[in-house]
Image (tube, coloured by chain):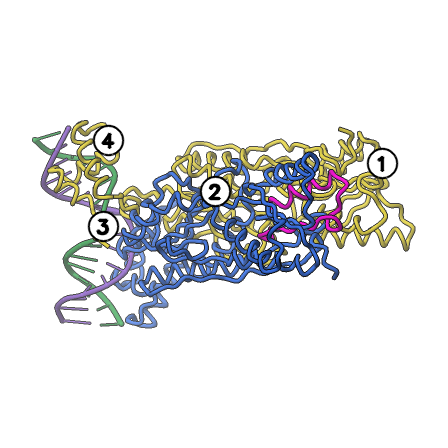
Chain colours: A blue, B yellow, C purple, D green
DNA sequence: CTGAAAGCGCTTACAG
DNA sequence: CTGAAAGCGCTTACAG
């Protein structure tokens, strides 16, 4: 294991000053073409790489973006929400394309994440990604803002939230998929998923759902049951509805809108254990279009968030913010993906 | 946005030298308890964070690990193999627990990844993660080794491969799940998945499969069909077998061992479109225990690789290597997860 | 226990 | 077009 070469070694070998080596390596137009070629050739031969720590220290920037992932408070330790993993993939690619490194970190809402990255010059900016109780971290986001930290948040734009955000239109997604079911002739609806302040995304989807029902005078019979975004919670929630139907004689819905695909998986599993057929007796739809949903039985109709575009937008917005350009919130449309669980004839 | 505080600002406020500030902040036992408390309090008040670039440059280490992800050459641009995402999650956690940052990067086998990270002091070591053609990058791994780069590779230990590796016993996994099917009375076997040099993991699984069949005198009737690790490839491969059975009168297998869960998903989908019942007519098993596999119909019997342990082992092995301790290959056992697609009575 | 000083390896004004 | 010099913000021998 030989010693690492420095720019001085190259300067020596090339017969120029170290300053010139630095310029040549950074493709400065100031330096003579011939000199540049010679320096670069020698650098290649020595397997020389610029020391990032030195260069970052001098330039006072790191060309690194930190991705802070907040997990669902309820998710078990080993499993990550597939939707976020898709986002991660897309963000990684977008960073690479823009010449940035990506530092990935899982965080608890309670941690001191709000001051960790940019202050220590480990990253030039931060991407905040996660479901969960946004109210819980609003104050930390505010601190980020007041410190002048560059960051962008995944989520719907929200007047109550400081900072810029890129998100998908959850209200419209909830509205569109509900309207799709209404168009298919469904009349008795249920929504499964948390509807409170703690889960703003789910709440927006629920509000879109309600709006669609109201517009078609179907709101009266609507049911709702809380569930966090797991297969198990979905299973339990629909079990509760089935029990109520049995014991209280409450009518059963003929269409169930789930706040996430994971929840829908649980609903499908529970219904498979009954006489009820999906979609003939009950239509079931999800949200997220995670990879699995194409392969369930029946294949799940769901709402897609464009993770590829989202990652690119998150990264490009953040990079703009880092160079102090003005940036704007971006709200992407949600797209209904029609498969079989909604009962559509295709 | 105020200027970032430095250790000199703190020194000034605390009435001590900058050296003492540095010592206090690093909890050096050399420094007086009182002084330390005072310095730390002031640092907190100023929202001071040590500049990582400066500290790394001085210490000549970065407390950062680079994770290089090599994708399946065939996977589409937007989707990542869920198994690797699970690994990523586990590696991220293990890094955080060990006080390391994690730089994540997707790579093509062809890129110049072999010299990017440690040489530039961006990372102290590298984790190599990916399926694919290991022969293709063997020379680069060798270069890594000769440069003295610290790295650990995910995959089975392999004499032909330089460097230390952590992996799961693919041969034993293939053997165990095949033997499980044999114990259930299956006699006509097929393996779906690439079996060549280009996919060493799949090949080892296939060899374990063959060994089990040979030991029970079932090898003669065995079929095999190539498939990369996608749902579509699995679908196509089983279609091919069904066609052969129709046109050539080849017998149909009563047990199909798939080289990955993704492949098994495709096989299940194809069989669902036939009269054939899984598991009554044909048992189907997968490999990886990705999240989906618990929720297919029927639920997929598969082989689990312990991703949590794998991530921890990868990180701890690498950290040992970084501090120049001797490290050893680690081969984890593979565990059969019994669900319904194998036809086991439970 | 504390301080003055050197130096990690770069980039970039400044001078020519 | 090139070089000598300063300095980014730390950590750590060295001296006391």
Q: For the residue labelled by badge 3, is the local secondary structure a helix, a strand or a loop?
A: loop
Q: Chain of mark 2?
A: A
What residue do we see at 59% from left, 32% from top?
A: B332
Q: Earlier in the sequence, mark 1 or mark 3?
A: 3
Residue B25 visible, this angle: yes
Q: Which label lies toward us, 3 or 4?
A: 3
Q: Looking at the picture, do discs 2 and 1 lie on one chain?
A: no
Q: Chain of mark 1?
A: B
Q: What is the distance, in whole Å, between disc 2 and disc 4 at their CAs?
A: 35 Å
Q: Quadrant of the N terminus of chain A?
A: top left
Q: Which label lies toward us, 2 or 1?
A: 2
**Residue under numbered circle 4:** B28
**Residue under numbered circle 3:** B4
Q: Looking at the picture, do discs 1 and 3 lie on one chain?
A: yes
Eyeballing the image, is A73 above or below B113? Answer: above
Q: Are marks 2 and 3 in contact (CB under 8 Å)?
A: no
Residue B99 shown in magenta: no
Q: For the residue labelled by badge 2, is the local secondary structure a helix, a strand or a loop?
A: loop
Q: For the residue labelled by badge 4, is the local secondary structure a helix, a strand or a loop?
A: loop
Q: Chain of mark 3?
A: B
Image coordinates of residue B340 in percent, x first then y, are 74, 36
Q: Which label lies toward us, 2 or 3?
A: 2
Q: What is the distance, in whole Å, between disc 2 and disc 1 at their CAs?
A: 46 Å
Q: Are marks 2 and 1 in contact (CB under 8 Å)?
A: no
Q: Compare residues A278 and B222 and report the one nearer the observer.
A: A278
**Residue under numbered circle 1:** B187
Near mark 4 (Cα within 10 A), the count class, few <14, some 14-19 or many ≥20, is: few
Q: What is the distance, in whole Å, between disc 1 and disc 3 at their CAs?
A: 71 Å
């Amino acid at each position: 294991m030989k010693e690492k070469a420095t720019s001085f070694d190259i300067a020596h070998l090339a017969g120029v000053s170290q300053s010139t080596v630095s310029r040549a390596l950074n493709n400065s137009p100031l330096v003579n073409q011939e000199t540049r070629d010679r320096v670069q050739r020698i650098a290649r031969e020595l397997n020389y790489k610029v020391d990032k720590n030195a260069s970052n220290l001098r330039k006072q920037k790191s060309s690194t973006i930190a991705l802070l992932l907040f997990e669902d408070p309820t998710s078990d330790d080993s499993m990550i929400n597939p939707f976020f993993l898709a986002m991660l993939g897309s963000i990684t690619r977008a960073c690479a394309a823009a010449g940035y490194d990506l530092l990935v970190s899982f965080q608890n809402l309670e941690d001191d994440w709000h001051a960790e990255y940019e202050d220590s010059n480990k990253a030039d900016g931060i991407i905040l990604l996660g479901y969960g109780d946004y109210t819980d971290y609003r104050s930390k986001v505010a601190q980020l803002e007041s410190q002048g930290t560059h960051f962008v948040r995944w989520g719907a734009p929200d007047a109550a939230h400081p900072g810029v955000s890129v998100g998908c239109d959850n209200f419209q997604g909830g509205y569109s998929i509900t309207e799709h079911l209404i168009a298919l002739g469904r009349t008795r609806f249920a929504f499964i998923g948390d509807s409170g302040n703690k889960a703003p995304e789910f709440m927006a989807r629920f509000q879109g759902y309600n709006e669609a029902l109201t517009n078609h005078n179907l709101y009266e019979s609507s049911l709702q049951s809380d569930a966090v975004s797991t297969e198990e919670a979905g299973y339990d929630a629909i079990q509760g509805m089935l029990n109520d139907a049995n014991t209280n004689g409450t009518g059963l819905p003929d269409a169930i809108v789930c706040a996430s695909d994971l929840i829908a998986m649980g609903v499908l599993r529970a219904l498979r254990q009954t006489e009820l057929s999906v979609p003939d007796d009950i239509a079931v739809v999800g949200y997220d279009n995670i990879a699995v949903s194409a392969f369930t039985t029946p294949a799940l109709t769901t709402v897609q968030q464009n993770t590829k575009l989202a990652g690119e937008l998150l990264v490009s917005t953040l990079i703009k913010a880092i160079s102090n350009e003005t940036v704007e919130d971006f709200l992407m449309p949600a797209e209904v993906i029609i498969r079989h669980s909604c009962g559509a004839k295709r």
